[in-house]
Image (tube, helix red, strand yellow):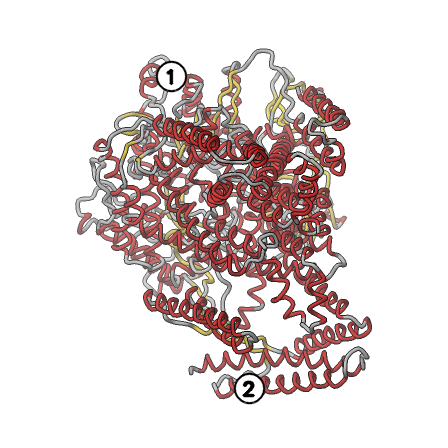
Amino acid sequence: MTPNLLYAVGTLATWAGIVFALRSVYFLVRVLMKSPSDSAARLQGSLASSAIVGAICFVVGVAVPVAANQPIGLRLPLVWFVLPLAGWFVVFGLFLVFARLFQAWMAISPEDRKQKTGAAGVWFGLSVLGLLFLQGTGQMSYEVITGGIPLTPTVLGGLLLLSVGTMAVIAVSESAARSRGIAKSVAAQLALIAGSVVFGLPFAFLVITSFKEDRDMSSANGIVWIPKVSETVPYMDPKEPLYEGQHNGQTIQGEVIESRPDGTVKVDIFKPLAIRGTTFETRMSDLKPVPRMVNLVSVTFQGKPAKGMVVSDLDDGRKVVRMLEPASVKDKEQTFNASAVENIRHEGLRWENYTEAISFLPPEAAGGLVYLRNSLILVVFSVLGTILSSSLVAYAFSRMRFPGRDGLFALVLSTMMLPAAVTMLPQFLIFRSLGWIDTLLPLWVPAFFGSAFNIFLLRQFFKQIPMELEDASKIDGCTYLRTFWEIMLPQIKPALAVIAVWTFVGAWNNFMGPLIYVNSPENMPISYALNLFRGERSGEPGMLMAFTTLTVLPVLGLFFFAQKYFIEGVTLSGLGGR
Amino acid sequence: MGQRRGAQSVEWTRRIRILSQISHPFGVELRTVLSPNNRLFALIALVLALAGLGPAQEAPAKPKRDLVIWGYAFTPDTKGQEAVIREFERRNPDIRVRALGMGAGNMDPQKLMTSIVGNVAPDVISQDRFSISDWASRGAFRPLDDMIERDKNSDPLTPVPSQYYPAPWAEATYEGKVYGIPTSADNRILYWNRGIFRQKAAELRAAGLDPDRPPRTWNEVLAYSKVITEKNPDGTLKRAGFMPNFGNSWLYMYAFQMNADFMSKDGRRCTMDTPAAETALQFMIDGYEILGGYERAKAFESGFLGKENDAFIVGKVAMKIDGDWIINDLSRYGPNLDFGVGPAPVPDDRYYHRGAFANEKDTFITWMGGYSLAIPKGARNVEDGWRFIKWATSTEGRMLEMEEQRKWERRRGRAFIPRQAGSREANEMAYVKFKPGDPKFAAAVKMHLDMAKFGKIRPATFVGQTLWSEHARAMETALYKKDTPKGALTKAQIAVQRELDAFFERDKYPTLDLSIPAKISLGVTLLLIGGFLFWFSRLKLGRLERSEAKWAYLFISPWLLGFFVLTLGPMLASLFFSFTQYDVLNEARWVGFRNYQDMFGADKELVMKALQNAFYLAAIGVPLGLATGLAIAILLNTAARGMRFYRTFFYMPAIVPLVASAVLWIWVLTPDANKGLINSFWQVTITPWMNVPPPGWLQSADWSKSALILMGVWGAGSGMVLWLAGLKGVPSSLYEASSIDGANPNRQFWAITLPQLSPIVFFNAVMGFIGAMQEFDRMYIMKPSNEGTVGPDDTMLTPVYHLFKNGFAFFKMGYASALAWMIFAIILLLTFTQFRLSKQWVHYEADK
């Protein structure tokens, strides 16, 4: 045994010791509380056994690494095995062999014992195969990485307090309520909160990043969690002011980019964003100058710190700063290198990431609303089509007898396994001949032909409905269609809801479809538009994250709105309405 | 128009209301069925109302012709292009230009291909030049010679070869015909950080190197790199001296400098595995060796995403070879960076004109690339497109573009840097007119301008895309040390040669009429229907049975119809294609089993790799996802309070558009601990505890699949809903009975919960495995933008991705179809095995 392996044994023992220690605390509290529902002797027995096993584990955990010349010291040992995939398979297989053998040993009926022993044999065979495979590929090696969490007094104290406290709370609440339910739900709540944090963190990261300035995307001190924005002040530029005027009945702001002797000027529109970047011609007299917002900065002026505003950016990257504070140097100007100028910033959200992201969408997209519309059309028709057709077909397969049923159902199943890629190209040729290229039709019309996936699922659900219901309706003289519509369909509403969710997500997510069929922005669903946007603006993470957030928001909103219909049906009425 | 559609939707809602009040022919009141879902109607109405929304299209006074251009997008960085288009519209008032980015023109040819096949091709496309021969060989682009000939005397804007550098013009020419007019023509030079050189002056001098000039030869650049590279105590890079493939050089650049040819003169043989190319590859390996290996350098490099964080600009890489696009970024994000330029270092023998290079005229060599404007086959508006190409590529057009871009930059307080053009005339005029004020930027532009004459291009061959991919793969394989340079290049050479042979041998195979599969499909369908009707009429059934059967057939008819039209027919067609060599644009040729032989022969390595990857993802990802989903569901089932909130929370990742989550996870998985969410935690936990540095995730061959699995677990909430439904469906009487018998929760889980949930476990497992085999979207979006391989060392290649690449990037529809059938066979096998096994452990209520 190598020292590393010994260390691994020690580590496992230590962690087992921790588990048993926590268990002892739990039982200790229960004993102290003298909960009347349990027999005291049993509790004390559990307490004693936990404490003894825990102590042994701890002793082993501490002693073994010492023997391996790797004293644990004041740290929680950690260990990890680096194995190839097949190696893990062998480990898993051997574990199952022992588990099954143990079960066989514990089994009551001889039949059961035989079955368990057989299973152990199968897993043993598989493990041997895995080993042979490993040997064949020459990957018969493993690596053990050892380490540990250093236990500084604060960490140690905190962890102890947390774990013991949790156990105590569980035990107390349990005995107080005299039922296991409460304790379980307290523990579950804690686990759920922890899980939510883990699952929600990427979202928090997304939203926060979408409000960050580009300079905060990376910093030497780790991730910036609190976005900051640069402060700005209005500044009336005497040379190149911003102008306000009227164009096509809209109030616009823009810059004059060309003046002609006859008094007409060419204006480059800045606001509103939807028409940003377009130009138009007007008379200078119709425009009125307005101040622009410029950055507030801190600089060192005449050897003293000063506050100023950037009034001009020069070609070579230098900046002209006009002083604002202190009063003694007010309105004095000086040119600085960019590195000598520091923007004054405060905590805040950079909403401009959003407006800028929208302004970069193609004009046909109407600020992204067209994408949203397309996605919604796609989703609604796909959901309707799938639910209607799949349930009808599934009903026939599960509840009606007809010649060739099993053969046809096998066919349904095999099409489910048919990779979409097989039919991708010929389907494309079919839709082309229908003239459906660059429309949304090829993306949702197939939903009305039922999908094998959903037929399979719904059949499972239909099969779980007791036969009596149907027989009753048959005796009442209902037609098949009516039985289906009135009796059976309501029974599987929860399943339909699940399918609606999946179809919804599937249609909303559909990426390969638009990739193949849709060419113009007027017909693009939102997810595909995001991919195009990503390709064009990957260098500007703030904007990219802002647009990503925008694509996520509608679907989350819809989900909140529709979750009653979608999920609650599933969870409250349960499978098959029982 | 918009208003009318809105009114229609109101009308629609009204009609639905009326409909819902009258009796339904089925004898069911529609209203009773649907009334709980009134809000569903509200939803539909909302959609229909939104359908009326859109760009308000005002009827133009005179109908204009649309000119669709792909590969152009309107952004602040392309203000000049926009001006060129607007000026074109002004000069041609009857034309409206619709310019789109589309990702076309780049390395994503699938969009262009489907549009050409679908008869919705754009009129003009801005296309990466090296791939033009590829397209032209298949007749996908229209030759422009006739129009050049026709207009060259009448229209001064007409492009003629004498205005252009020979290299870019030749790159867009295939078999003597011109298929594209060059616009940009980037070339690559060496950028070096003077500040760092000065900082290290003493050490450089000690090593016998001059800190005031850039390295000129390969040995010099390695020597400089050795001195300048700095490492952290844990072996990771602190600063890199020279990273051979950082910036833009690939193997092509160094191989060109060795005078390596990738193709024989007649274009029939691939000559990738020459000693010259091998030497070039060895140089790259040596360069990475100084940095501690490719893997480490990659992880370092990927920490600098975004232009403002470019590793060269922030002083983390001291020397790089890059194209002229970088000057603009330098002026914007690093105006104070003290940098110098020089020609890209060349092999020592070339520099000193000795050995194999004794008679070589040119000392320095660079690699030239860029874009051309071309007209795809099937463009509806060829004349207008040609008019636009003439205008946009003319010197006048180029000058207008630069002038407008300069105005724009100036108003933003930024310097304007002219980009290199394929037209010599435009290039030289631009330098005179738009020479940057800052001498260091001016020097950089001048260096690119001077090097343009020495530009070499990738071979103009119809296997350009394959050649590119294989060259990149060979480079990666060798840099990851999975193979020797010689071995990697030979493998690549064989792969390209196979394509060449297939092309030149194709005449040997008979052509096929593609209406055959259509006819076969139709025939089979009619036969099946006829056979069925005959069979059904002969069946001995009772009256009731017959009626039930008829109803049942009626019920399954939507699926049957879909099956014949959208599944069986296409399947037969695809099976037929799998025996052909077919690139969609030309007629198919019957090649028998060749495609299938290739799969287990020449292409075996990649096919096996794709299968292994899928198996890995399925074997680890699926059980992990199932367990996570079940765990969450059980927790939710226990804690009734806050259920709604948690449920939404855990479900959120599953409902987010995949593209969005992929974009998000690219950032979450960024290797740089200062940026990537996961590695920022790794840095403060696992690194100090286990002494393991943060992994490179998507950038690392060892970790990329783990990264995908991690992301998959995050999305496990989609299965959770089903688990929850299942859990609620387990009769509580079972639990009550068992707890009277003294079973503990643990025992209850294994004895009651799991067996009761087994149909769902089974369903999820089957679907999970099938899904893993067919993963495509995530890999397509998340693979690092390394055009040759799918993920580092092809570790993100899945079977369907391999198929997609072959079908849409290499136009091998026949081979792609064969792959599809192999995937189908494997999935079928897997699923039937699972079904067989399921009999033993899946518990169905109705089967009793």
Q: Is residue B222 above or below residue A567?
A: below
Q: At x 47% / y 62%, what residue is drawn?
A: B238
Amino acid type assigned to the residue bearing label 2 in the image = Val
Q: Residue B462: give x, y in percent of width and height.
A: 30, 35
Q: Give the answer, above or below, for where A529 lies relative to A229.
A: above
* Residue B448 percent location from the top left of the image: 37, 40
Name the foreground residue: B80 vs A326: B80
Q: In which chain is the residue bearing label 1?
A: B
Residue nearest the viewer, comparing B289 with B601: B601
| Residue receiving disc 1 | B156
Residue B451 location (% of width, % of height): 33, 40
Would you say B343 lies left or right of B384 here? Answer: left
Q: Are marks 2 and 1 on the same chain?
A: no
Q: Around disc 2, counting alpha carbons within 10 Å, would you say few (fewer than 14), some (14 to 19), or many (20 or more)?
A: some
**In-image side of B825 versus B1 (left or right):** left
- Indicate the quadrant where residue A16 lies: bottom right
Is the residue A71 above or below the residue A428 in the image? below
Secondary element type, mark 2: helix
In three-dimensional space, the C-alpha distance between marks 2 and 1, rounded to whole angstroms, equals 91 Å
Amino acid identity at mark 1: Pro
**Disc 2: which residue:** A60
Q: Nearer the viewer, mark 2 or mark 1?
A: 2
Query: Across the whole image, how many numbered discs are drawn on residues?
Result: 2
SS class, disc 1: loop
The chain letter under disc 2 is: A
